[in-house]
Amino acid sequence: MKKKIIVDPIKNTGREINYIPFRYIVAIFLVVLETLAVIAVMSFITIYVPYFYFAVVATQFGVAIAIINRKDNPDYKLPWLFFVMLIPIVGFMLYFMFYSRKLNKKQIKRMDRLTKQRIKKDDTGLLAQLSSQDEIIVSQAAILKKLSDSHIYANTDIRYFPLGENLFAAMVEDLKKAEKFIFMEYFIIEGGLFWNTILEILKKKAKSGVEVRVVYDDIGCMMTLPGSYHKQLRKLGIKAVPFSRLRGQANNEFNNRSHRKITVIDGKVGYTGGVNIADEYINRIERFGHWKDAGLRMQGEAVNELTRLFLIDYGLNDKKAEDNFADYFGNEVCKQDGYCIPFGDGPKPIYERQVAKTAILNMLNQAKRYVYITTPYLIIDNELIQTLENTAMRGVDVRIITPHIPDKKLVFLMTRSHYALLLKAGVNIYEYESGFVHAKTYLSDDETAIVGTINMDYRSLVHHFENGVWIYKHKVLEDIKKDIFDTQAKSIQVGSGMLKENLWQRFVRAMVKVFSPLL
């Protein structure tokens, strides 16, 4: 039982209730029950059916070989090999039920239909302009554009918000101006000042004929919204769907969540970044000290990419959706220097390669002077670790800012487990002393940046639907750099003396590193 402030969508008031997420408890119970039942049946057959044990051993080795031969990251293979080889029956049954990160066949079929609706745009001219300025940078843009099926844009105004409360104030004013449609997709929505204020606007707009749609992640909102909340919103004239509704199936439904944060207004204005719709994100309530977040407001041609991402996610979760995406694309032009690529990332087969990870690796490999990063988590594979080390060792100033006050102690332990190697290579690490850093920003050489929803962890880089904006030579980079310096000034620089551990702590850290790809 947990006390929560849950919004009443009819009266639009916050009210404290004892909220027990029964539907989610039942779903999780069904997953556990199904898993145990399958393992129990297999174990029973092994004991009572002659020679079945040999089939089990053959399957065990067959699965191990299959894992080794898969194209997945070796860091992800290791814990599964541990389970399969050391825990008979249980190991390979868990593999069969939970290993896959792909969408199911119905989702894939729907995705094929949705992703065929592309933005009609010729990037040849802008890529040529970019190539004339920097032949190395154009390669970053080209591969990111290709992997994410996105486009490169100029003529887009971008504003940077160093805190959630700044973004909230601007978003409210833009929402009030909506005339045609409002699209909102968030990992977390929770009743309180932030959501109540927005919901009041959405209700009025829907009543006046503005099309309003909301997508929220079903697991992300497991402890913040009732399981039937989308039905309550529909009664208000708001088209709402939970993303990947939890049904209690022993498969990959706990992966492939929507971690995206998107607001689009009339196809003209778009918001993204790390800020969810809950009061801790605007420091209205305090959970882990001061909440340091960041976000972007975009106005211009590039907003169409956010619109497309939203409509794909909405269509994936609403079987009846038959939208013509072009009806929602805007033609807003804001004369600005610089370029940007709004992009999405997610599981196979929608994205055959890891889009965000590739963009981060390219930024690190091509940096000449510095790379500054803020991230709430640092749970990364060997490839990213080595790239960070190599970048620092060739003389690039690499700085990473993480929280000093953790939101999850186990995850904090995983984050700190990578410090020693990175420090030894010359990476400078800081912890935000005032509280929790939730901003996901990557900045290099005063030229390129990535701002969005992408954490440096397995959830973001492998499992979830994410989105971000790659930016090149735009005036907004000055604001991003200033914010990173301001955040660093409020942080503690990590030294080797902070990392002393006893034998038990070292053992726990080692085990955590092995199994972190599964968390």
Image (cartoon, rainbow, N blue to C red):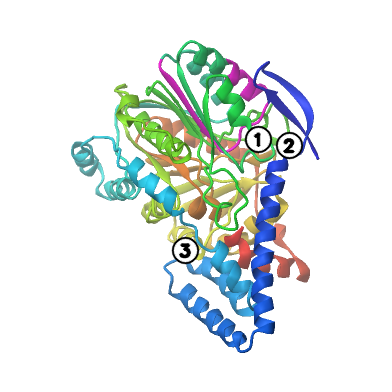
Asked if the residue under mark 2 is in contact with the one under mark 1, i.e. CB atoms within 8 Å, the reply is yes
* Residue 94 visible in the current orientation: yes
User: How far apart in space, not on screen, are marks 3 and 1 (Cα)?
Assistant: 30 Å
* Horizontal side of residue 103 vs 278, given as left or right: left
Q: Which residue occupies 44% across, 32% down?
A: 478
Whether residue 406 is visible here, answered yes or no, is: no
List x then y, in percent, for residue 264.
44, 26
Residue where numbered disc 2 is placed: 287
* Residue 26 point in image, percent of width and height: 70, 48
Region rendered in magenta: 180-200
Look at the numbered disc 3 and give the secondary structure of its residue: helix
Where, quadrant-wise, is the C terminus in this rendering?
Answer: bottom right
Quadrant location, the N terminus: top right
Left or right, 466 with respect to 362, comes to right
State the residue position of label 1. 291
Residue 491, compared with residue 28, is above or below; it is above
